[in-house]
């Protein structure tokens, strides 16, 4: 659904949509920047450049280059030293949305939560069993 928003790059007001997250002017600029980066990467000797080197040679912001990689417009399978940022800690990643240590942390966090839930359930069941015993004793 389209909504009025401020462009995150230049603050201009624009209609935000599902695949429109910057204003038309910035979109055009981003497209130009992408072509610059892509033209640079296509040269055989530049294929192994990392994000900092690309920024240095093309003048395109590192953040934007990382965004292109995250969007898979520049693919790490093709350009082995390209990275983008983990959504949780900002660390370098080449695949998915989180780095391996964040994935692990979230995973163990989930396991812990699950263990706590199990524990709570057992406690509740034990409590219920106790109450039952109590009432049945009273009935006697
Ligand atoms: Zn803009
Ligand atoms: Zn991370």
Image (tube, rainbow, N blue to C red):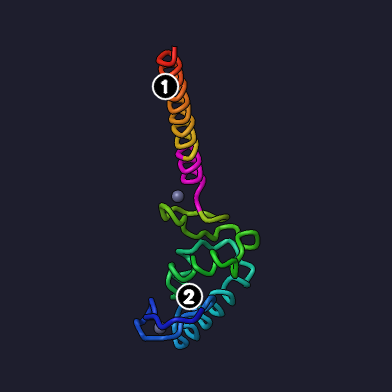
Task: Pick the residue in front: 94 or 107.
Answer: 107
**What residue do we see at 41% from left, 17% from top?**
134
**What residue do we see at 50% from left, 52% from top?**
98
Element carrying mark 2: helix
**What residue do we see at 53% from left, 76% from top?**
18
Label 1 packing within 10 angstroms: few (<14), some (14-19), many (20+): few
Quarter of the image for residue 79 reads: bottom right
For the view shown, which residue lies furthest in the left direction?
Answer: 11
* Vertical side of 105 occupied by 96: above or below: below
Q: Which residue is mark 2?
A: 58
Residue 4 lies left or right of residue 31; in this view the side is left
Task: Pick the residue in front: 34 or 103.
Answer: 103
Task: Pick the residue in front: 28 or 76.
Answer: 28
Q: Where, quadrant-wise, is the C terminus in this rendering?
A: top left
Element carrying mark 1: helix
Q: Position of residue 112 (x, y in %)?
A: 45, 34
Query: Any mark on residue 113, and which?
Result: none
Quarter of the image for residue 38 reads: bottom right
Query: Any mark on residue 131, and which?
Result: 1
Q: Looking at the magenta stretch, what is its main secondary structure?
A: helix
Which residues lie in the magenta part?
98-109
Label 2 packing within 10 angstroms: few (<14), some (14-19), many (20+): some
Magenta span contains residue 100: yes
Front of the two marks 2 and 1 = 1
Distance from Cα at disc 2 to Cα at disc 1: 73 Å
């Amino acid at each position: 659904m389209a909504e009025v928003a401020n462009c995150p790059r230049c603050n201009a007001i624009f209609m935000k949509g599902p695949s429109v997250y910057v204003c038309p002017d910035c979109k055009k600029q981003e497209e130009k920047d992408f072509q610059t980066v892509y033209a640079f990467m296509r040269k055989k000797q530049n294929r192994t450049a990392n994000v900092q080197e690309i920024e240095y040679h093309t003048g395109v912001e590192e953040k934007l280059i990382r965004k292109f990689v995250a969007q898979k417009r520049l693919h790490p399978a093709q350009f082995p030293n390209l990275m983008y940022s983990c959504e949780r800690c900002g660390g370098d990643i080449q695949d998915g949305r989180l780095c391996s240590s964040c994935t692990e942390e979230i995973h163990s966090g989930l396991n812990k939560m699950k263990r706590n839930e199990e524990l709570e359930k057992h406690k509740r069941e034990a409590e219920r069993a106790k109450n039952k015993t109590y009432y049945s004793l009273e009935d006697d």
